[in-house]
Image: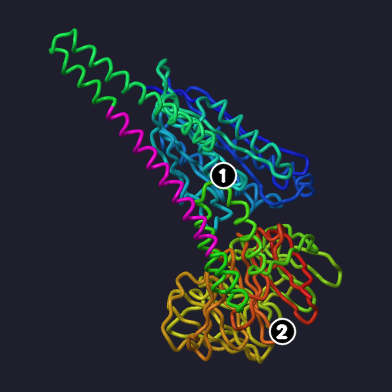
Amino acid sequence: MKLKTNVGQIFLTHPKDENFTSVYEESFSRDGASVDLFAVIEIAGIGPQMLKASKADYEKLTQTIVGALKRTYIAAPSVSEETFEKALANINSSLSRLGSKEKITWFGRLNATLGAVAGNQLSLSVVGNGVVYLYREDEPSLLSDGLAEEKPKPTKLFANYASGGLANGDRVVLSNRELLNFLSQERLNSFLSSETLEDACEEIITALSDVKDTGFATYVFEAASSEKSPSPVERKIRTASRGSRDFANYLEIAKYAAISAAGFLWQSISGAVKFIIHFFRVRPKKYLFMAIAVVLILFLGNIALATWRKNHQAVQESQTTTAAAIEQKLSEAESALIYNNENGAVVLITEIETLLASLDKNSPDRASLENRLLSLKNKVSKDVRVDNPTVLTEFGSVPTNLIRSPNGFLGYNKNSGRLAFYDFRAGSTKPVLQNQNTGNLSFGVFLGSNAGYTFLHKDGKFVKLDIDGESLADLNAGTNADVSLADLARGRALAVLGENSNARLYALDHKTQQIWRMNVNDSGIATPDRWLKTTADFTEARDLAIDGSVYVLYADHLEKYFNGTRQNFQISAISPPAKNLVSIFTAPDLQSLYLADPDNKRIIILNKQGQLEKQLISEKLHELSDLFVDEKAGLLYALSGSELLQINIK
């Protein structure tokens, strides 16, 4: 059965958008079959000023992607699944050429969704937080799961793709997760169950109309047969109630209907009995079975009504029980805070949130319970709002790491090798080694005024960076048969303790599950020695920091080691829980540990016993990747996207 594609679009932009958005859709015929091409492109977290300044660059990026996609399908001798794969290769090649010729401000910020429908076959690929959902018979499936690379390469942004067949009535959403930041999955599902695609898009646009600082780009299309019969989605909608959004009203109506039905049943049964008595006085007995059948039907109807009443009463009792359980746990959490048991309070808050999610939104107790919960969370979270952190500079590229020296900050991207230096003295930023091959630079540290900036090279050596002279020079380094420097360069992290000839380097190696220590001396860097004296699993480790002890960071927790041995150390419970920590910073002269949590737009500050001191919250922290802290000056420096932020922590 041939399917045709009906397309709906949600494209909303405003003058104060924090992101750039663009959409593309085109249909044409090839080999007697229709081909539909889709692109949804976003450059996220740039702000209105940067959007205005770089809009032409972003539009050129869009044209590059769309142009390569379209050219591939038009030039292909025949259209198949391999055509989409070739299109992605052409797009990656075009973007690589674009990046080699011009300044790139979008790498690390690009979220894109590409789709192609050829005949009844859908092919798709995503970058960043692009998403594709399939709604088949009102059941959503995330088709883009696992397609986006965690760390995309500049030369291969669109790395993976998926293909599959469409069925009559399928609805497909191509968007980015920005949409789900403002619409819950439940609301989106509800909108997409509308009878027509036009109604679905109109409802989504209406729901987003009050958001004035974010652009939205989404395509919704439906695969439908050319026959007149309704699609499976339409058929299901026509036979199912659409009153779920007004559930309370539905219950009131049902209650009234049940009472009316009960009265009607009683009158019917009474009338039926009278009718039967009269009937058998004048009619033959052959109608007896018919009369019994009527009575039986009425009897079963009465049983069904009683069952409904019982179930409805059970639901009400369950809601009452849930509200009482929330009330009790709120009291327990408030008591825990009185006795300074913050961990216990956080655990209870998590349980309360789970229970509250199951409480009917129209429950008369819900508002007061939510207010008490909010008050508790404010006491536990120790949030400090940072509304306007100072933007010291905006790097031309998007660095992943930050290295502090007395004169400024070196920002570098360990994936692309791009470097730029922000000079405190001049208040200016310049690219470093712009015309040299720096793609093999991995981890970097500042070893002190004598040794300066030092990088671990993926070729298995250490190199010293001369910023003023714009050059790299090899450093002498010892070797160890048990590990190669090339392996360490592909490890998890590198950190330094001390300065100059007293400095020691620590490398976190997930391949050998070891922490390697290297002494620094006047002639170079000594042989790597095993520092860890116990077994460990660093497979999922993300970063490390040193103050005499070694702290190893994971996505949701922290481990502490001293003298090569793991310590009994656990951070306090945090609300909301951390799930994607990306960086840690501390030093011997610091009193606290600083953890970067971009998902929650915060910097978590712990004392060195692991207890929460406070959380710095700011919308500017949504792309956090690295930190540096000067506690004496009371200043914290955060790398968020391409921006270097300064925050006063006194």
Q: Earlier in the sequence, mark 1 or mark 2?
A: 1
Q: Which mark is residue 362?
A: 1
x and y, in percent, of residue 49 in the image: 80, 49
Secondary element at tag 1: loop
Name the residue: 20% across, 21% down: 292
* Circles 1, 2 touching at the beta carbon (< 8 Å): no
Per the image, is 316 magenta? yes
At label 1, counting other C-alpha atoms closer than 10 Å, the crowd grade (few under 14, some 14-19, many 20 or more) is few
Q: Is-magenta flag for residue 602?
A: no
Residue 12 or residue 66, whichever sits in front: 12
Q: Amino acid at mark 2?
A: Gly
Residue bearing the label numbered 2: 448
Task: Indicate the position of residue 331 as horizontal and vertical percent values.
Answer: 57, 67
For this rendering, which residue is in front, 428 or 253? 253
> In the rendered view of the protein, which quadrant contains the C terminus?
bottom right
Name the element at disc 2. Answer: loop
Q: Start and end of the magenta stretch?
A: 299-328
